[in-house]
Amino acid sequence: MRSEITVKIASFPPAWRRAASAVILTLTLLVSFTYAEPQSADPGPSEIRRMIRKAVKLTRNESLAEAEALLRRVLEVAPANSAAKVELAFLLTKQRRLTDAYNLVFPVAEAEPTNARAFSVLGNVLLIGGRFKEARAIFFNAIRIDRRQHLAWAGYGLLDFYENRISESLANLNEATFHAPDEPDHLFALAQVSARAELYTEAADAYRKFLNVSSINDKDRRARIVSLINFLRFLGQRTSLYQSVGSESTDVGFDLEGNRPVIEVRVNDQERPFRFVLDTGSGITVISDKTAATLKLKPVTRGGYAKGIGGDGKFEVVYGFLQKLGIGSVAMRNVPVYIRPFHNSNQVIDGYLGLSLISKFLTTVDYGSKRFMLSKRDDDRRDFTDSGELSLPLRLTSSGFLSGEVTLEGIDSPLNFIVDTGASVSVISDRVANNRSIVPFASDEKLKVIGAAGVTDDVQSFMLPKVTFGPHSRKQIVAIALDLDIINEASGFEQAGILGGNFLKNYRMTFDFRNSKVIFKSINPEN
């Protein structure tokens, strides 16, 4: 059974009422239940406190079902116990049951204006739900009440991380780990941000500490992290990654194939060029296993399986390293890459040019002229800033995706969508597809999806009447419905879909990664 729940914040304390009152969370979630183990007698106050402490420990150790049973037992005998409500909300948030979590913790925060833990958990719910502005206000209130609230400090750190304020993110996450040095979630976030800051040795150390204090039993996940640690230590030994050895700017043409820009790339001084998709939906540059064999490229490290869309939902993690990669007159040395199989396609593609490389530049993708431009010149950046055109904010997810706020006709609240030049068509999540406002737009046409993990046939498609990004709208946009739980798990905050090439091909886009902004300029009349 599915349940659609709309939640509004109404009456907060004055200091933060204005920021919070605008929050509207519209989520379509599977309704689930659990049970509590039978007890011979109702526990007394001291036993209740013991049960809550045990549940907190179980949650930290990822024994979520057992922790939930304990907390629900407490609430059976003491339904007004705010501590149990807050900790249950935190547990539900870890399971991404955001509506249930919100409905538990919000009344506690409203009724207990000095409950710093309640505000920290509420902020965490809003953060994962993609309500950044409101989450920041709530975290501020939590720390104002109690500066030791490590969850709020970590929340600040993740907010800064997603908005590309890396030094501020590191400072806030270090504050979180100071107050809770063995909290696995904080260490994992610190490792991610350190890697983004190219502090590879520090990132490897944080991941190692995470493994030492966490209780994850997923063998694939542990193997992935071990492989990543080894790769980060390898990168930390390199004197300079992404070292520029060419000109500061370039302007090259591209082919548009299946709504995806395909450019010629030079690799390791090979005579023939290689064909790479420009892929803002990939955090790291990827090459095919066949291309790696052609280049005689040996893996730096491998281990475990990553999750992906298509096929059986996973593929082996293999890291590699390119000595040199060139685009037009721009060239860079020491480029980390992913190596994986590329699945059934009529197009011959050698790789995907990811954000870890192109984010070093002011980047323009002009679908009208089919030109791709990179620049490190400050004059070009000033021209972009002073252009007078409206720039739209973008956020970087934990996994390196670009995310922006998109509105779909029929749904009032903006939704987070990945901006993905490497996707042929747009995507909506299964949850969005099940929204009663979207269901009528389902199409009889079923499509094949080629993802990182393989091929999926007979995927439901939709004809969305109107899709809006900032001031730009397009009518009659085809979108497919996919389970995006894998992407959301890696993103850090909820993504409702992917803005693909069938929308993006109508624009000239300039990405300013330094300031997390993009200018969209229409090149085709609205359809």
Image: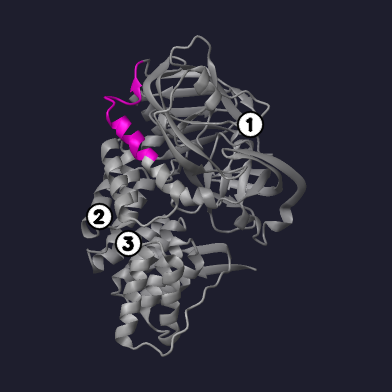
Q: Which residue is mark 2?
A: 177
Q: Residue at x 36, y 73 (%)?
A: 109
Precedes in sequence: disc 2 or disc 3? 3
451 in relation to 183, above or below: above
Q: Residue 413's quadrant in the figure?
A: bottom right
Precedes in sequence: disc 2 or disc 1? 2
- Out of 357 and 9, give the one closest to the viewer: 357
Q: Residue at x 30, y 46 (%)?
A: 208
Q: Is residue 218 left or right of residue 289?
A: left
The location of residue 390, given as percent across then percent down, is 47, 40
- Which quadrant is home to the C terminus? top right
Q: Is residue 114 left or right of residue 440?
A: left
- Which quadrant is home to the N terminus? bottom right
361 in relation to 389, above or below: above
- Out of 370 and 283, give the one closest to the viewer: 283
- Out of 476 and 350, give the one closest to the viewer: 350
Q: Residues within 10 Å of mark 1 (few under 14, many from 20)?
A: some
What's the magenta region? 227-245
Q: Residue furthest right?
A: 444
Asked if residue 165 shows in the view, the reply is no
Q: What is the secondary structure assignment of the residue under circle 3?
A: helix
Q: Which residue is mark 3?
A: 139
Amino acid on which the number 1 mark rests in the picture: Asn
Q: What is the secondary structure assignment of the residue under circle 1?
A: loop
